[in-house]
Amino acid sequence: MLSTTDALNLYNRGAYVECSQALTRLGVVDSKLFPVFEKEANRWVKEADSSSVERRALVAASVALEIAHLFREQRSERAGHYLVWASLLMRKHQATPQSEAERYWYLASIAGFLEVDTYWKLTAGLGTDAGEFQDLMWALGPGGHLAAAWRRFPDEPRLLLARVEAEEYLSQGLGAQRVEPFSDVFTPERLQDLRMRAAARVPDSVHTIEEMVARSNRDLAVAALNHFRLIPQVESHFQALERYEGLRGEIELRVGFLEFLLANWGSALEHFDRVAAFTDDAYLLYLSEYFSGRTFQKLDDHDAAISAFERAQEIIPGARSVAVQLGKELFLNDRAGSRDRVYPLLSSAFAASAPDDPWRLYLRGDARLWPVYMAHLREALK
């Protein structure tokens, strides 16, 4: 069985494939490993002489990212222990000046933090979870790992983007986690309903189920209205990043989505249409078409919605979010052959071989870029 020390030595020599294969063998990495890893990795770093301690810290922190990635589909604290340990280690051993390897480590680590289920809570220090997970957030300090990364690389565009993405999350209220944000668009009718519920009088202390439900409805309405009021501020912060040419496509997409939430349909479509002028990233292009389709649905322009969803499907065949919406549109229209397309469309999207869905990744910021950043990090460490 591969020991922590063996894994660290392999990684330090640049034997990344061999190290990765060893880590993924059955039984090598389990939920009880962290105390052993922490003890051996701390000893391995301390054994370094003064000229190599910073490199050893970076290597150990990188192996922690590799292990955390293996836990990304499990309870957040399993990956969280490795991520928090690595964050604190990197803060303790900061090289002067910063290196490309360190920069890619911070980008990869942010992506790794965003892979866990409670993605922004550890990344940016948001949330009120109790128990062990709360202790992990406290260990990272105010602003979470993102604050430490930004202090180290304050001019890194992807970190600046992540800060605004965290602000967008926070604008929904502490602990909020959107599951289907398209269901909470701030149309005039929706706003009127929210204002009525927010103004409802409820007793200071609840004694019945009915009173508890009334208070919950009021509090949810107040939180939704606070989100509505903060959206223009978040938009302006996204737009302030347009000076970074490499972010333009993503900024257009995110501002367009916020305009969608505000029910500004025409403005949303204009932003989505501009995405393709600034990027060839399939993920961003898919979402620009998918979001366009959802906007056309709100406008009751179902032919345009079908066209947008079909373009998205061509970009990433088998993606589930567009398959569901396109399937619905095809099933409800009366054209010959439309309904016959639905079953194979959905079967492909719900097969085990279906690709990661871009919409499920949208709220997780740079999580999708973990493999890209790790490839750069490994190369820089050689």
Image: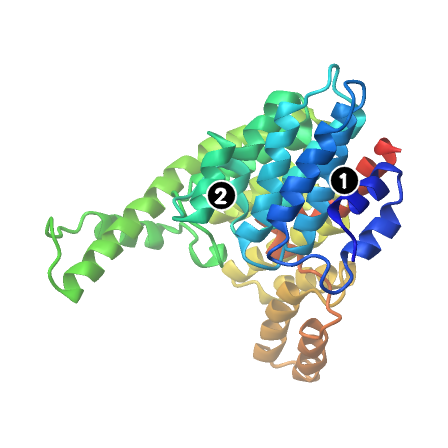
User: Is residue 156 toward the left or the right of residue 151 in the image?
Assistant: right
Judging from the image, the colouring scheme is: rainbow
The image's mark for residue 187 is none
Q: Secondary structure at mark 1?
A: helix
User: Is residue 47 toward the left or the right of residue 212 in the image?
Assistant: right
The image's mark for residue 121 is 2
Asked which quadrant contains residue 249, the reply is: top right
Can residue 26 be seen at all in this image of the molecule? Answer: yes
Q: Is residue 129 above or below residue 210?
A: above
Residue occupied by mark 1? 373
Residue drawn 62% across the image and 25% down it: 91
Q: Position of residue 148 (x, y in %)?
A: 58, 27
Location of the C terminus (image quadrant): top right
Q: Label 1 amino acid?
A: Tyr
Residue drawn 52% across the image and 41% down it: 122
Asked if the residue at tag 1 contacts the one at tag 2, i.e. Cβ–Cβ closer than 8 Å, the answer is no
Choose the circle earlier in sequence order: 2 or 1: 2
Q: Position of residue 55 (x, y in %)?
A: 78, 27
Q: Position of residue 333 (x, y in %)?
A: 59, 77
Separation of marks 2 and 1 at Cα, in angstroms: 21 Å
